[in-house]
Amino acid sequence: MDIKFALKKLEESQEFKQWRKNNKNAYFSYAFKIPQEMGSNDWQLGFYDKKKDKITTFVTVGDNIQIRAEEEIFKKEDMKVNEIELGKVKITFDNAIAKANEFQEKNFPKDKSIKTIAILQNLTKLGNVWNITYVTEAFNTLNMKIDASTGKMLEHNLASILSFRKE
């Protein structure tokens, strides 16, 4: 399901409307999906409240909506959590994955994905991006940041999973 449709469906739900009454300042800050573990219509949609510096995540599974308890956000102290500018998001999740697959096959053919982590977010230096990470058969992570307006590959990085170990 396209992110815009999923968000619209969420915003029309009673659960969201009830939550929104007490959280007027929170804004849409991320969408998250692991396609291998979630259904095609399933999303985690996050809303950030700057005053509280906390995030509320809504999990959509089919027609069911679950609200997770408000939680601390995982970020560096000086990092800003930006609102996603939905009007500028022209590239769908499926298009972003197709572009990521094409890039991986052309540039890193030995690094086939066994798990995909996709996040739509608004990064201060890059704007709205599909931040897609592949965990690969070769024990690497391939991270790609794809412009959510144009589909252009903005950044990419290949790193060994083993490099994340602490000595």
Image (spheres, rainbow, N blue to C red):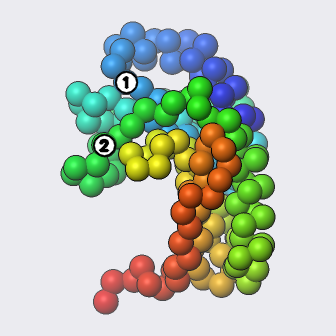
Q: How many marks?
A: 2
- How far across and down, in percent of the image, does residue 14 sit? 55, 12
Q: Is residue 73 left or right of residue 98?
A: left
Residue type at numbered disc 2: Lys
Mark 1 to mark 2: distance in Å? Answer: 14 Å
Determine which residue is flagged by label 2.
Answer: 80
Determine if residue 123 is in view: yes
Label 2: which secondary element: loop
Q: Does residue 120 lie above or below 104 as drawn? A: above
Residue 133 numbered mark, or none: none
Instruction: Write the residue at 28% across / 48% down.
Output: 79
Instruction: Write the residue at 38% across / 45% down.
Output: 124
Q: Examine the image and state in which quarter residue 18 appears.
A: top left
- How far across and down, in percent of the image, does residue 85 sit? 51, 30
Which image quarter is the N terminus in?
Answer: top right
Residue type at numbered disc 1: Ala
Between 114 and 30, the residue placed more toward the observer is: 30
- How far across and down, in percent of the image, does residue 146 sit? 61, 53
Determine if residue 32 is in view: no
Between 133 and 84, the residue placed more toward the observer is: 84
Circles 1 and 2: CB distance less than 8 Å? no
Ranked by sequence position, the earlier of labels 1 and 2 is 1
Between 94 and 136, the residue placed more toward the observer is: 94
Which image quarter is the C terminus in?
Answer: bottom left
Determine which residue is flagged by label 1.
Answer: 26
Instruction: Write the residue at 23% across / 27% down.
Output: 51
Instruction: Write the residue at 59% across / 48% down.
Output: 147
